[in-house]
Image (tube, rainbow, N blue to C red):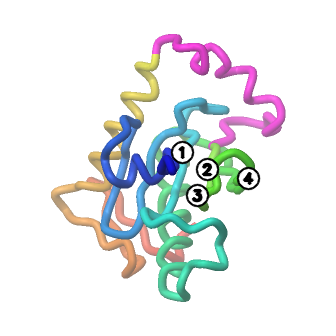
Amino acid sequence: MNECIFCEIANRRAETYLIYMDDRFMIFHDIRPMNLGHVIVAPRRHIEDISELTDEEYKDFMSLVVITARLLRKILGAKRVTVFSIGAKITHFHFHLVPILNDEKLSEIGSKFSAMKEGADRTKIINLVEEMKKCFSSQWGLIIYGHRICFSRFWWSHNIK
């Protein structure tokens, strides 16, 4: 049986725009983005739905989703970040985070980046991924599960909106 693509990414056997990975979770830019900053947050171990997360994993996973959304808003100046899960083609549980940059609707933004889906210049994705990587590996440190984080010159706490 072939491993799923997310398991391949988790085991570093598939290339991706990897942003962050620890022993439990990973974040990477979607290879078929609906918008610049369309990222995937997923557990590294293969589970098929959210109910398979332990209580601790759920808390830490959701903290990572919130931190990632805040980082996308800060870097891209997004108005909001939409979060959803589909799981139709890939059964490995994951959330999509898609930044909304203005008053556009989620249904409208897919066509804007359709050229990227067909292999156009990916410089913007690469630059964003590199900037996000720097934030997650800041010399100032990063405390994800403690809910207080430092991204380079920006301090946030879990309660700041």
Q: Residue at x 65, y 50 (%)?
A: 81
Q: Quadrant of the C terminus?
A: bottom right
Q: Closer to us: mark 3 or mark 2?
A: 3
Q: CA distance from mark 2 to mark 4?
A: 12 Å
| Residue type at numbered disc 3 | His
Q: Residue at x 32, y 57 (%)?
A: 151
Residue 107 covered by magenta stretch = yes
Q: Are marks 3 and 1 in contact (CB under 8 Å)?
A: no
Within 10 angstroms of label 1, few (less than 14), some, or many (20 or more) residues? many
Q: Residue at x 67, y 18 (%)?
A: 114
- The number of numbered badges drawn on the structure is 4
Q: CA distance from mark 3 to mark 1?
A: 15 Å
Instruction: Residue lying at the far left in this picture: please name it.
Output: 139
Within 10 angstroms of label 3, few (less than 14), some, or many (20 or more) residues? many
Choose the circle earlier in sequence order: 3 or 2.
3
Choose the circle earlier in sequence order: 2 or 4.
4
Percent position of residue 145, x then y = 39, 78
Q: Closer to us: mark 4 or mark 3?
A: 3
| Residue type at numbered disc 1 | Val
Magenta segment boundaries in residue numbering: 99-121
Q: Badge 3 is on which residue?
A: 92
Q: Nearer the viewer, residue 108 or 71?
A: 108
Q: Badge 1 is on which residue?
A: 39
Percent position of residue 144, x then y = 37, 71
Task: From this view, report whether residue 87 is shown above or below residue 35.
Answer: below
| Residue type at numbered disc 2 | Leu
Instruction: Residue lying at the far front in this picture: please name it.
Output: 1
